[in-house]
Image (tube, coloured by chain):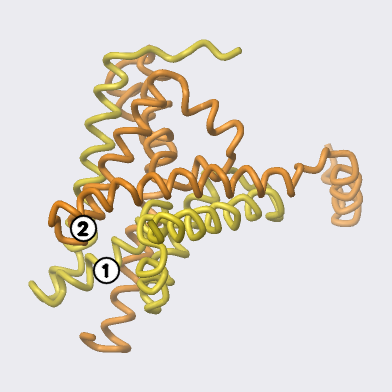
Chain colours: A yellow, B orange
Amino acid sequence: MITVFWAFIVGGGLCVLAQLALDLGVGKVTPAHVLVGAVVVGAILSGLGLYSPLVALGGAGATIPILGFGHALVQGSLRDFTLRGWVGLLTGGFTATALGLSTVVILGFLAALLFNPKRKY
Amino acid sequence: MTKASKKEQQHFERLLRKHRPNPPVLRNTVTAFITGGTITALAQLVMNFFLARGVKPLEATAFTSAVMIFAGSFLTAIGVYDLIGRWGGMGAALPITGFANAVVSPALEYKREGYVLGLGAKMFVVAGPVIVFGVVTAFVVSLLRLLLWGVG
């Protein structure tokens, strides 16, 4: 149960930072800008070896926020490099994130076939 | 039309900032924390379920993402996730359920503009930039790490 508690704290904390970036950021900041920034920050922290400790502490609290996508891309590249050499640098990112990306594309397509947008009110 | 001078522009910016309503930062922070924390805590419950069944941690992480994507897609399709997003702000947008929402929502919305240029193209209106900047940054970061640290 302690893992769920830390997931709440770490996941909630990352969302607070993203919300502050959205509200206090200079210039025209949209949620899309914040998401892109979060992926970039996640990848950089991962490369510096700082994101893995956060995953060890927060579990899903660190992997489920989109920063975890950047982390998975970097770790996948480094892992495939050790397995396959330089070509792994280009294959690893997508290998590590393939399950999520395929799922989101297939479900997005199916959802659009089966459902219609709800009326905005 | 003459272009406004730098000074005039700055003056206008200041005027604009004074009259634009400030976002309720504290309230947004609290709702983002609660929403984001709840979503990731639920994800951890899913992950613990997989781990308890002997799934390896790396695969359990990927499976958990897939389950959360399913949940986010379904809640978007039935119109519930937009309500969560309106209350939770980035707390709903930052988790992978929000990524699913950013894909499914335009897919539904733009279906009427055709399956290829509507559904197929608009699906990636937010997910596309995230993947582009993610992949490019990850490539540069991984390359630098290998060149500077070696295989660690």
What's under tag 1, amino acid-wise?
Gln
Residue beneath label 2, please? A96
Residue at 51 percent across and 58 percent down: it is: A9
Q: Chain of mark 1?
A: A
Quarter of the figure with the C terminus of chain B:
bottom left
Report helix, strand or loop for mark 2. Answer: helix
What residue would you read off at disc 1? A75
The circle on residue B21 is none
Location of residue B76 by image quarter: top left
| Whole-number angstrom distance, CA of label 1 to CA of label 2 | 8 Å
Give the mark, 1 or 2, whose residue is nearer the N terminus. 1
Q: Is residue B49 left or right of residue A87?
A: right
Badge 2: how crowded within 10 Å, few (<14), some, or many (20+)? many
Label 1 close to label 2 by CB (< 8 Å): yes
In the foreground, B12 or B16: B16
Name above or below for residue B9 compared with residue A43: above
Q: Is residue A49 above or below residue A69?
A: below
Residue farthest to the left, as pictured:
A84
Residue A51: percent from the left, percent from the top?
40, 70
A121 lies above or below B133: above
Category of crowding for the residue at label 1, using alpha-carbon neighbours closer than 10 angstroms: few (below 14), some (14–19), many (at least 20) = many
The residue nearer to you, when weighing A97 against A57, is A57
